[in-house]
């Protein structure tokens, strides 16, 4: 059954599937449309921008909040992943008030003046999402999984072999539960967007995949729920990824199309920043490892030697901010006291030129 949320709330919270499906059937009979925004909670402005986009294009928005265990590897940060239920609910409530101030009631499809609103939050237990077997993060673990290969083996998938299996599986479950007209994902997780589009196409899922632009902090850092672990020192150095990608983008915009020229510009920035950090004392520096910087085809993520300007490309990268070696009690070390390694991903899109 739907949980009993306070009367002041403008949405229902569902812990199980049948009552949510009842609501979905009612909306279908009323010719209303549903946009789904899947999240793992710890909501930030990036998530809220997707909800706003969904509200502009649908009468009803469903938000899922579920930290999906099957996309975390055996030794990854499942237990330390931030869980901020109370603040998440508060943010959605405030956003609903914002949406209501732009119009009366739920929006009409195609209307930009009367937006929809969040009417349901799906916050299931793992028993609900994985009803027959406990979820597993083992590479060859038992379970019912969705695999999208070879896309899921590239880039992030090379370092995190079960990650996209878990993402595709939980998204398939959410799409089957909600049957949304549209689903909303952020461009920051670019490989995820490519995989979800492929899954929807290959499995003939009746939903439209919508991609929202990456929301960034004032200095360019891509917003992420994991940023709370960075602290001041690692956050400042963590800008290296965005700076490297921007250098590569500048090379492309200046007329360079070869992999060596474009990625050479990015690698030069990364190496320079790392060398500068290594020259500092352990109490001053923030070390990192570059996992990859990629220049890939926008459809199948094949690495490119030369960019075809009529097709464009995806420039993406990942760095791992290592735990602080030494710190002082006075400095802001972030959640986890600077001891949690933080993986940062980002990307820029080279749009096709006609």
Image: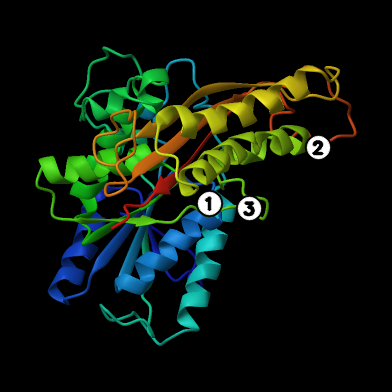
Q: Is residue 180 above or below residue 297?
A: below
Question: Circle 1 sits on which residue?
Answer: 43
- Residue that lies at the very extreme toward the front in this rendered image: 255
Secondary structure found at label 2: loop
Quarter of the image where one finds residue 256: top left
Quick one: which residue is furthest to the top in this view?
A: 140
The residue closer to the viewer here, 67 or 6, is 67
Q: Secondary structure at mark 3?
A: loop
N-term-proximal mark, 1 vs 2: 1
Per the image, the residue denoted by label 2 is 332
Residue at mark 3: 217
Q: Nearer the viewer, mark 3 or mark 2?
A: 3
- Mark 3 vs mark 2: which is more N-terminal? 3
Residue at (72% x, 32% y) in the render: 234
Name the one closer to the observer, 235 or 83: 235
Residue 129 x, y percent position in the rendering: 29, 37
Q: Residue at x 11, y 41 (%)?
A: 203
Between label 1 and label 2, give the one nearer the viewer. 2
Residue 6 versus residue 179 in the image, above or below? below
Color encoding of the figure:
rainbow
Residue at 52%, 25% in the rendered image: 77
Figure quadrant of the C terminus:
bottom left
Q: Give me the C-alpha separation between circle 3 and circle 1.
A: 14 Å
Q: Taking 347 as reference, is 173 left or right?
A: left
The residue mark sitting in front, 3 or 1, is 3
Q: Which x, y percent locates residue 287?
A: 70, 21
């Amino acid at each position: 059954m739907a949980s009993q949320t306070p009367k002041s709330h403008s949405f229902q919270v569902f812990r199980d599937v049948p009552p949510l499906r009842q609501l979905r059937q009612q909306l279908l009979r009323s010719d209303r449309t549903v946009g789904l925004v899947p999240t793992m909670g710890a909501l930030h402005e990036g998530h809220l921008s997707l909800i706003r986009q969904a509200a502009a294009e649908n009468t009803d928005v469903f938000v899922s909040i579920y930290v999906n265990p099957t996309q975390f590897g055996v030794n990854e940060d499942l237990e330390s992943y931030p869980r901020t239920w109370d603040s998440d609910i508060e943010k959605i409530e405030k956003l609903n008030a914002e949406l209501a101030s732009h119009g009366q009631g739920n929006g009409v499809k195609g209307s930009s003046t009367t937006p929809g609103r969040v009417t349901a939050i799906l916050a299931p237990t793992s028993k609900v999402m994985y009803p027959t077997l406990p979820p597993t993060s083992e590479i060859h673990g038992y379970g019912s999984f969705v695999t999208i290969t070879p896309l899921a083996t590239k880039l992030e998938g090379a370092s995190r072999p079960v990650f996209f299996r878990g993402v595709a599986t939980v998204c398939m479950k959410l799409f089957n539960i909600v049957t949304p007209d549209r689903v909303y994902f952020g461009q920051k997780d670019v490989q995820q967007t490519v995989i979800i589009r492929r899954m929807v196409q290959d499995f003939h899922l009746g939903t439209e995949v919508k991609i929202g632009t990456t929301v960034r902090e004032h200095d360019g850092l891509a917003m992420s729920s994991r940023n709370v672990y960075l602290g001041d020192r690692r956050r400042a150095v963590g800008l290296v990824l965005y700076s490297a990608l921007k250098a590569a983008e500048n090379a492309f915009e200046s007329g360079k199309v070869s992999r060596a020229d474009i990625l050479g510009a990015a690698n030069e920035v990364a190496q320079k920043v790392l060398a500068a950090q290594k020259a500092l004392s352990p109490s001053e520096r923030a070390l990192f490892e570059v996992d990859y910087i990629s220049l890939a085809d926008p459809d199948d993520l094949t690495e490119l030697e030369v960019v075809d300007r009529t097709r464009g490309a995806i420039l993406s990268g990942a760095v791992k901010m290592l735990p602080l070696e030494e710190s002082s009690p006075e400095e802001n070390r972030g959640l986890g006291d600077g001891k949690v390694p933080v993986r940062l991903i980002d990307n820029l899109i080279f749009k096709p030129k006609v």
